[in-house]
């Protein structure tokens, strides 16, 4: 198992940037593909980005492609989500999650979840 803790959320104006971090416990972090998901009030949880175990493969939701970048540092047991050109519609609670297999885009493929961090983008 792995325990995940997100950080880096906050309030930012439209067009600004934030860098989210997700720190993982344990010694098998590199065995997990990692994903980022978000959920706004009254809306369903949606996929944002995912990265393969070695960082060689990434996938992004169309809504964030070109603006967000997911990366990982396995030596630090940390995955990141760099968010640029933020828009008000990016406002949500952002969650990181770990998958013991492939870097899928569906949330049910991820068994381990962090507590979430709030991102609010003002217009």
Image (tube, rainbow, N blue to C red):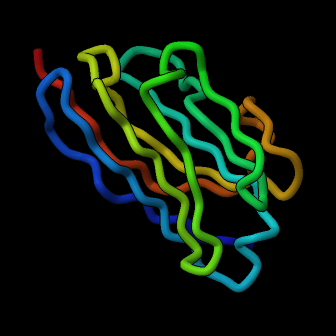
Residue 15 % position (x, y): 20, 23
- Expressed as whole percent of the image width and height from the top left, the position of residue 97 reads 62, 51
Q: Position of residue 81 (x, y in %)?
A: 46, 46
Quadrant assignment, res 100: bottom right
Quarter in which the C terminus is drawn: top left
User: Which residue is pictured at 69% across the width and 32% down the height?
Assistant: 59
Q: Is residue 18 above or below residue 28?
A: above
Q: How many marks?
A: 0
Q: Is residue 38 above or below residue 31?
A: above
Q: Residue at x 28, y 25 (%)?
A: 86
Name the residue at 60% across, 21% down: 61
- Give the side of residue 120 with respect to residue 38, left or right: left
Quarter containing the N terminus: bottom right
In this rendering, position of residue 83 left or right of residue 63: left
Front residue of 110 and 76: 76
Q: Residue furthest right?
A: 101
Identify the residue at horizontal 17%, vertical 21% (top origin): 14
Image-based side of 82 in relation to 50, left or right: left
Q: Residue furthest bottom?
A: 27
Residue in front for this viewpoint, 17 or 35: 17
Q: Horizontal and vertical percent for residue 22?
A: 48, 61
């Amino acid at each position: 198992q792995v325990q995940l803790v997100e950080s880096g959320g906050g309030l930012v104006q439209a067009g600004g940037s934030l860098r989210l971090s997700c720190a993982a416990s344990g010694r098998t972090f590199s065995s997990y593909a990692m994903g980022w998901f978000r959920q706004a009030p009254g809306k369903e949880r949606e996929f944002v980005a995912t990265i393969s175990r070695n960082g060689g493969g990434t996938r992004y939701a169309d809504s964030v492609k070109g603006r967000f970048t997911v990366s990982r540092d396995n030596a630090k047991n940390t995955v990141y989500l760099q968010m640029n050109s933020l828009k008000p519609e990016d406002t949500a609670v952002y969650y990181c999650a770990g998958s013991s297999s492939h870097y899928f885009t569906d949330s049910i493929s991820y068994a381990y979840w962090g507590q979430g961090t709030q991102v609010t983008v003002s217009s």
